[in-house]
Amino acid sequence: MDWKETRLGPQRQPSGKSILSAAFPLFVQIENRGKTFRFFWLLRFNRQRVGKVFIRRIFMKAICCSMLSARLFGGIVLAFFVASSPLRAAKPREELPPATVARGVTVRLVRDEILRLYDKPLRAAKAGETFEVIEVRASVKKVFLGVQDRGRLVAVSVPLEAVAAGSKPAVPGRISKADALFAGVIPILKLTIDGPEMDRLRKDPHSYVEVSLEEAGGAIIKHAGLKLKGSAGSFQNIDEHPGFSINTDKFKGGERFHGLKRFQLNNCAQDSTALNEIICGEIARKAGVPASRCTHALVSLNGRDMGIYVLKEGFTEDFLSAFFTRTDGHLYDGGFLNDIGTNMELDHGDPADKTRITEFAGAINEQDPVRQQERMAGVLDIDAFMRFAVMESLFCHWDGYTFNRNNYRVYENPETGKFHFILHGMDQMFGDAGWSMHRQPVAAVGSILWRKPENKERYAAQLLDIYEKVIKPVDWAARAEEVGQRLYKVLAANNPGTAGSYLPNIADARGRIADRMNNVRRQMEGNSLLKTVASKGSAELGSAPWVAQLENAQSQELKSEGRQLLYIRAAGEAGNGSWRLPIQVASGKYRFEAQIKVRGVLPVAAQTGAGAGLRISGESRPAGLKGETNWQKVSYDFVSDGGEQVLIIELRARAGEMWAPRAALRLLKLP
């Protein structure tokens, strides 16, 4: 039998208001060996089910038997199957993931595939490998899978058709909703606040109002609580670009946003890169110092595009459980420019029990120096504080606890009875590449601990451990680039105009972090001189990382007469140029030696010394070389109680030049 044409109709439009409320004709025409056969059926539908019945599938099978003779058609068997279901609109089939491919299930690859991190290849994966799903993005036909990369959980993407669903993983191995959120998938959030509630925020921005929170492609959380956040420098009102604190459990809820009951949306008013808090948090957690996880979010409020925010997890029991076995201790907010005291705001714990915080405050106010150190050791985890202080120095966190008594939390660990500091407010970071890793603390706790030489040694030990395990092995500048590019790609897809203006900020963050990490490496190399001085009684300083500091002066490194020279030229009425080297020393007497040659030096009187000479930071020297001289040996003796000293080669003059060969720079330990 030869089939020449098969047509399915309707051949005419049915009457009535709806196609489901009238007869639907089905017409089939078959031509075989020059003869035409026509078949007609009329499908009727019950009018009472109009709007509730939907033709899901019409499946027709025609079986034609061979003709018994040239003029005899053996028979045709036709079968129809009509299935009905409630009428509903649906997306095109190709845009929907398989029903069982969803967050939290295990999937396997059905083919070899490249796992992509921020659209860049991470590694190749073989067919049959299994992963847990973090998120499904049906609109772009991608599925995000959780994998470990350099010790952190990240979301990698593969095409949706490259996976097949498996089953729910065992609970102990599951990736939590919060872990999935901070693995790298950027949420797009719509906040809706009613008019009366907006008016309340205008009058009292720090009181909670109800907000509806809708995530693109996700759930809607109604009746969450929202208030404005921020202090000097970052606070903006509701009609500007405010920061938000959100509590999904505040009113009628109990619902969580990706596993979070409380989180913040920081407006990045003091960080145009929107990268500082994210990168600093990663570094801190890798070093074992408590800090919140963060990711980016694109936010709109009542239809108004608010742009880029940093979504930061709140200080809840869930947060504490990542660092402490017990989470039933007292958590305090240090407040604005406040040191440790019994008046601190309680975030979590029993407000009636102030026993340990009273003891902590008492240790700070203790007048006897020996007793004070003993009491501090009884209420504070000192090594944990040293690691916290290392982080604040590494980040140049001038507005944190150690250097400004601001932006911090303290938690009383009920397992040990001792307090731990928690990092916070890390938006203005990496502003001073030369920030000393041994800068003297300002706040009470650090100032007290630094009075005991053994504590400085404990700090140096924690610094070295963090440097070797966290700072040195990781290219943190490249990591900032990765996170910035991830945000850029989401911006480019959703707001191309903003994406273009954001791109230079990535380079800015990368450059500042690279400069800071390079400087810290130079400082740590300088610290190795301490061991040399201790073991040999002297150390050569020629290969150390000397850094120029200039005011109305110029500097460069030269090579002359086969020697590497540090050079300074005065270029103004009050020229002040120097080469500096931070170095750790034990307590004792020292001599700093160099050779210096000057030409045309007209000295300027200054409290720290005139002309060309040597000294240490914080001290003055006798009048130095002036006019024109050949190579002369110069030295400066000083006494140290231990800790960091900054060695200085300087020229203070209205005019003139000076040279100092690297090979002649030495530090000696005196008897």
Image (cartoon, grey):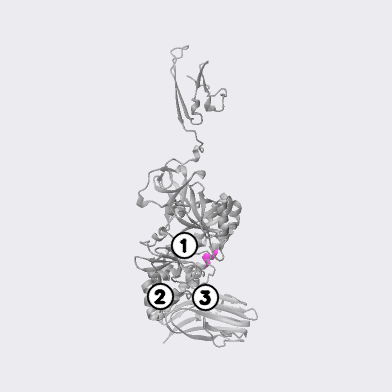
Which residues make up the magenta segment?
A: 511-515
Numbered mark located on residue 362 in the image? 2
Q: In this view, does 78 lie above or below 378?
A: above
Q: What residue type is labelled 2?
A: Gly
Q: Which amino acid does label 1 sit on?
A: Gly
Q: Name the residue under label 3.
A: 546
Query: What is the x, y in percent for residue 167?
Result: 37, 44
Q: Which of marks 1 and 3 is nearer the N terminus?
A: 1
Query: What is the x, y in percent for residue 551?
Result: 60, 77
Q: Nearer the viewer, residue 314 or 330?
A: 330
For the residues labelled 2 and 1, the Cα–Cα distance comes to 31 Å
Label 1 secondary element: helix
For the residues labelled 1 and 3, the Cα–Cα distance comes to 30 Å
Q: What residue type is labelled 3?
A: Trp
Q: Mark 1 points at which residue?
A: 281
Q: Which of 505 and 550 is in front in this view?
A: 505
Q: In this view, does 468 lie above or below 562?
A: above
Query: Residue 80 is drawn in which quadrant?
Result: top left
Numbered mark located on residue 537 in the image? none
Q: Which of marks 2 and 1 is in front?
A: 2
Task: Identify the main secondary structure in magenta.
Answer: helix
Magenta span includes 231: no
Query: What is the x, y in percent for residue 427?
Result: 52, 64
Query: What is the x, y in percent for residue 455?
Result: 40, 76
Label 3 secondary element: loop
Whether residue 370 sits left or right of residue 497 in the image: it is left
Q: Nearer the viewer, residue 54 or 661?
A: 54
Badge 1 crowding class, 10 Å Cα cut-off, few under 14, some 14 to 19, many 20 or more, is many
Residue at 41%, 67% (x, y): give it.
Answer: 420
